[in-house]
Amino acid sequence: MIKVKQLIILCGLAILMLGLFGCDDPVPDDVENLYPQKQILWPSIADTPWPMLRHDPQGTNRSQYSGGQLGEVVFGYFVEGFQSEASLSLDTDNNVFRLFTNSGYGSQFNVNPDGETMWFTQIGRLMEAVSTLLHTPNNIGLVPLYKEKTIVSMDLQTGIANQTIYLGYEPLHLKIDRSGNMYVHSSDRTTFNSYTPAGEMRWSITDLGWMSGEFQFSPDGEVIYVMGADSLYALSTDGEKIWSYKKIGGTYTFLLDNSGCLYLGEGNSTITCLLPTGGVRWAVAAEEIDMERFFSGNSQTMDTKGNFYFNGSMIDGPSGIFSLDNEGNFRWFREHRLTTDLICDQDDNIYFGYSEGPYKMTSIDSDGNLNWQVEYGNGHGRMAFTPAIGSNGYVYYPIKDGYDYDIIVVR
């Protein structure tokens, strides 16, 4: 009888051990990735590989596609007589759209995946650094024109403007909500306005102070987050203040994750994660991770596991890229010269270019290890703001004031 009991106990232990160690995937997916991030589609924004500045209304700079794997230049594109600080956007066929200026006037260029100009059209004077075409369904693009005080709607197949909305002031940032309503900063950063898709004023706010940076949307599109003079404001899409958070220092760019948490650098001193309700989820002081300063003018990114990547410099040391996990724990630092905005692909590879010196494009993996780095051309112009990733696996790097290239494409 004792032997029978012992046999039963041994069988039970064997079954338990098999359950613990015998599975092909011993750790459930929801445990492996506690903070999964994915693309959030909006009906008002075209489902293209890169439809707008920062890729999406949450400002994640994260693509739903894989980026370049080889580190090989596909082509360099140059527009004689034109220059640009603008980022770029892509349509469903990976055609590139970028705004350039010549003698103060803006032109929209459409370049196909082979580097051939499909069309270009002069559209007026613009604020280059933030004038990235926003793609809406049915091949319609929106762009704010600075001196003309308008928003122009363009047919992206022909480059012909089909609607002009006069604002009466110089527009800066432009975004739209899930219903297509437009939200615009004034260029003096004192007014924040909303318009219907037809251009009728919905509301205007003038008491946020000098708005120091961009604005982003919550994942559900119900809340807008605006950087005021000394506070971050959460507004409803009807223009009502929901809450405010007093910042430690200046902030230009920030992003939101799928749960609605906000990630921002407060001046040079602190990396902060805010809950959707405005409370502090965590805050990491720069000295805790041996960081001297956070580069708040460069855009950050977040990978599919919720890891956060940003630019900064070490105390008495080099500049480079830092990474924190979703709970604010330090992951790593990798030395790189001052870089452009960071972007991420679906495989958690990070892409960026150097913002000074030769055109040097770089890719690292989620652990900070170098995938590839390629130097191209003889020019010494710097990279301009945010690169983009196409569904073809190409990474499109915009060049600022390029002497021999304005866009460099790497696979």
Image: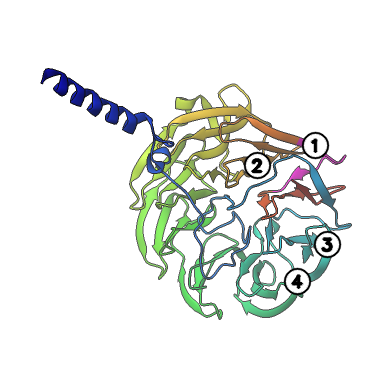
Residue at 47% of width from left, 43% of height from top?
A: 306
Q: Which residue is mark 2?
A: 351
Contact, CB < 8 Å: mark 3 with mark 2?
A: no
Name the secondary structure under disc 3.
loop
Using the numbered discs, state the Cα–Cα distance from disc 4 to disc 3 in whole angstroms: 13 Å
Residue 396 lies, in percent from the top left, at 72, 50
Q: Which residue is mark 4?
A: 123
Q: Which residue is mark 1?
A: 375
Q: Which residues are magenta?
A: 374-384
Which is in the foreground here, disc 4 or disc 3?
4
63 relative to 291, above or below:
below
The kind of residue tagged 1 is Glu
How many C-alpha atoms fall within 10 Å of the one at disc 3: few (<14), some, or many (≥20)?
few
Q: Which mark is residue 103?
A: 3
Name the secondary structure under disc 1.
strand
Contact, CB < 8 Å: mark 4 with mark 3?
A: no
